[in-house]
Image (cartoon, grey):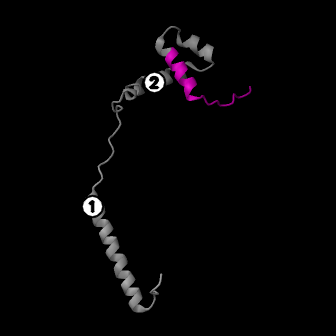
Amino acid sequence: MARRVRRTHHPAFKAKVALAALKGEKTLAELAQQYDVHPNQITDWKARLTEGAAGLFGGPAQGAEPAPAVELKLLHAKIGELALGNDFLSSALSNAGLLSAKR
């Protein structure tokens, strides 16, 4: 028995098959035979299409978490701390003669 080579389908093809399944004019078995795809795959594409359809009309997708709020004060404090550390090390190295004046 020869193994079948794994196929990858283009997103446009998946959308076409999922829309055909959503219309319901043909059964899953008929669509599977017509497009040469397993019926479980068609069911999966149909479910993904119906889940993602709400996001097409501007609303946030279900289950999508909002981006975490960036705490600017915390980031600015960290930048200041690192800048002070760099200044201290620069002056300490130049006092020790290990850092040249011209960089």
Question: CA–CA distance between discs 2 and 1?
Answer: 41 Å
- Label 2: few (<14), some or many (≥20) within 10 Å? some
Instruction: Give, as a three-letter code, the residue at label 2.
Output: Leu
- Name the quadrant containing residue 101: bottom left
- Residue 54, image x, y percentages: 37, 26
* Label pair 2/1, CB-CB below 8 angstroms: no
- Residue 17, image x, y percentages: 54, 19
For residue 102, above or below residue 60: below
- Label 1: few (<14), some or many (≥20) within 10 Å? few
The residue located at (50%, 24%) in the rendering is 45
- Residue 21, image x, y percentages: 50, 15
Q: Residue furthest top?
A: 25
For residue 71, above or below residue 26: below
Residue receiving disc 2: 49
The residue located at (30%, 53%) in the rendering is 70
Residue receiving disc 1: 74
